[in-house]
Image (cartoon, grey):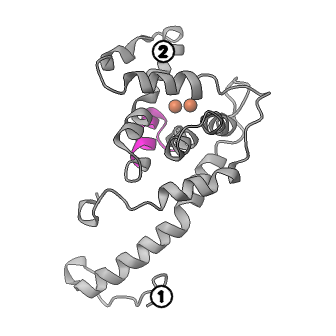
Amino acid sequence: MDPTSPRTVTWTNMEDGTADDYVESTASFNQHVHDSLTDHLFGLLRSMQGPRFGYQVDRYRHSLQSATRTLRNGEDTEMVVAALLHDVGDVVAPANHSAVAAEILKPYVSDRTHWIVRHHGVFQGYYFFHHVGGDRDAREAFRDHEWFDDCAAFCDEYDQNCFDPAYDELPLEDFRPLVEEVLHRPSRFEMVTLA
Ligand SMILES: [Fe+2]
Ligand SMILES: [Fe+2]
């Protein structure tokens, strides 16, 4: 069977499908994900090229600088990928971008990496929330968490400092092998738990 072009089912209501139908369509879908997910996420990253909102670099360069600093500092592959994608939720979910990026990564990364990406927004607030009417210490709600220091370090070393027009970040395609290594890991979720 060519998983990219399964036979078309005869039914229109899912309740009428057979096990064979779903085995074939699931294999086809999984192959599609394997082949295209990196490109889709790179598309989101590239869509952040342009607008700078007054910053000296756009969010695309910010993301590349974050990943490049993470790589050059010797972090493991999934943390480099997490850094590259930590703001990708901004494109489609600006009000909760940390949660969206974290959920994109969750099937393929450790609980620690997921937690860091999930909470980087509130931790990043330490550097500017007080200038816009917020509480820069909002992150203190997580002070006793085992990964508090790790998330604080992520923001300090790989996020708040990644707005430098003079920084020589690596090009996006240099990260493709790393992204594919992570995204091609077996998902931690079983198909039956997908939602
Ligand atoms: Fe962010
Ligand atoms: Fe960021």
Residue 60 percent location from the top left of the image: 66, 40
Could you classify mark 1 by the number of other residues whose Cα lies within 10 Å: few (under 14), some (14-19), or many (20 or more)? few
Q: Quadrant of residue 156?
A: top right
Left or right placement of residue 46 versus residue 192 in this view: right
* In the foreground, 2 or 135: 2
The amino acid sitting under disc 1 is: Asp
Which residue is drawn at the image coordinates 31% and 81% (left, top)?
23
Residue range highlighted in magenta: 92-103
Q: Is residue 195 above or below residue 117?
A: below
The amino acid sitting under disc 2 is: Tyr
Q: Earlier in the sequence, mark 2 or mark 1?
A: 1
Rounded to the nearest angstrom, the CA distance separating label 2 from label 1 is: 51 Å
Residue highlighted by disc 1: 2
Secondary structure at numbered mark 1: loop
Q: Is residue 139 above or below residue 168?
A: above
Residue 8 percent location from the top left of the image: 39, 88
Which residue is drawn at the image coordinates 35% and 83% (left, top)?
24
